[in-house]
Amino acid sequence: MLYYLSQYVLEHAGATTWGDFLSGLRVLQYITFRSAGAAVTALLLSLWLGPRVIRGLLAMDFGQQYVDRARAVAGSKVAAGRKLGVPTMGGLLIVVVIDLTALLWAQWNTLVVLTLVPLIGLAALGFYDDYAKITAQKGDGVRGRIKLLVQGAIGLFLGVYLWRWEETRTLVSDIMVPFFKNPVLTGVPLLGAGLTLLTVMGSSNAVNLTDGMDGLAIGCTLIVTLVLVVLTYVASHVEIARYLNVPHVNGAGELTVVCAGMFGAGLGFLWFNCHPAQVFMGDTGSLALGGVLGIIAVLIHQPLVLLIAGGVFVMEALSVMLQVGYFKYSRRRTGEGRRVFRRAPLHHHFEELGWAESQVVTRFYILGIFFGVLALATLKLR
């Protein structure tokens, strides 16, 4: 909105005495300036709205009165007891701030719409899931099949939509692999659509599984978002993209603005979510943020780079898959289910080993930064 307003003012004031005075508004044409503005605006909005959202959630009795299932199984009674009554659905704060910031600072194009509409849809799914858990006062919520169905529908729609339009068709039909200059496969839309589907579903669920400790999921999301700020800007710049041998995506610069807003909103939320947490993002935030990370990676033709940048999320998801898979396999073979980890997801395994919650979160941050740097290295190592 600010960009369009500035263009309107410059167009009508250019030939008047106000022309020189208002010429500074041209700075809004630059993606870097609008990205910085989006980040600062989102941070300030989050810090201002945060206490009000928390009070509102408490007034509506949207506090988590049930013990998280993973913690109940892990027997972490002290930590679980401390978290009882803390309001959930805090992801509403993040989603609202991201949308408001994008409305203010971004130029609205197809890529922005394809990012923000699913953000709202996945947040609505997560909100319904959180509400079901709260009203039942247990950690069941929406059935996993329904979550996968909605996530899959969004991923499938994205893949089909991108394939139908000629200017975005290669985002689906060609397969890019990290550390390779050129697509390893071309003209494979079905494979590309399947990869798009898996990216959206996998990213959404992986962030959701990581959301089990104060500040863990949002902190790791911030790291991946910073990586996407760089990747989207590189993809939007013709010369830089050509120099680094990465796909140029017309209009991807506006995704840089969205990512910057997401970073600012996440920082503001972390202010209230750090240990000891005053609010949880809940599935409202984790499903939405995870899905959007996957969508943006697809839109800049780098879904497999997300596997590297989101290495912490990958580890968390794999730990659950390995735990469940091996438990079922061993029970079928020996009659007794066995475990790979003490508990899953992975952060609870280290908690069982005696690590304090703040230690787990900080060390996962360090791993997240390592994976983020490795992901950015793929830009040059080709």
Image (tube, rainbow, N blue to C red):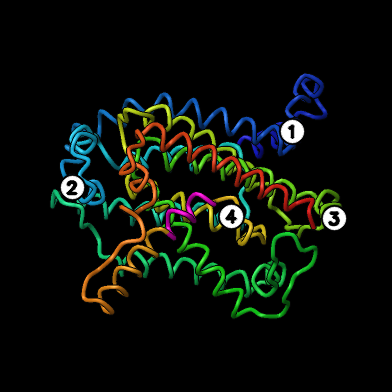
Residue 66: in sight, yes or no? yes
Task: Assign a secondary structure to mark 4.
Answer: helix
- Highlighted range, magenta: 311-318
Which disc number belongs to residue 242?
3
**13 on left or right of 311:** right
Q: Nearer the viewer, mark 3 or mark 1?
A: 3
For disc 4, the neighbor class at 10 Å (few under 14, some 14 to 19, many from 20) is many
Question: Is residue 243 placed above or below 331 in the rendered structure?
Answer: above
Query: Percent position (x, y) of residue 119?
Result: 45, 52
Tell me which numbered mark, 1 or 2, is placed earlier along the sequence: 1
The single residue placed furthest to the left in the displayed view is 136
Kind of element beneath mark 2? helix
Marks 1 & 4, CB-CB < 8 Å contact: no
Question: Mark 1 belongs to which amino acid?
Answer: His
**Residue occupied by mark 4:** 296
List x then y, in percent, for residue 100. 49, 38
Residue that label 2 marks: 134
User: Distance between the Cα atoms at labels 3 and 1?
Assistant: 37 Å
Which residue is disc 1 drawn over? 12
Which three-letter amino acid code belongs to the residue tagged 2? Ile
The amino acid beneath tag 3 is Arg
Give SS at disc 3: helix
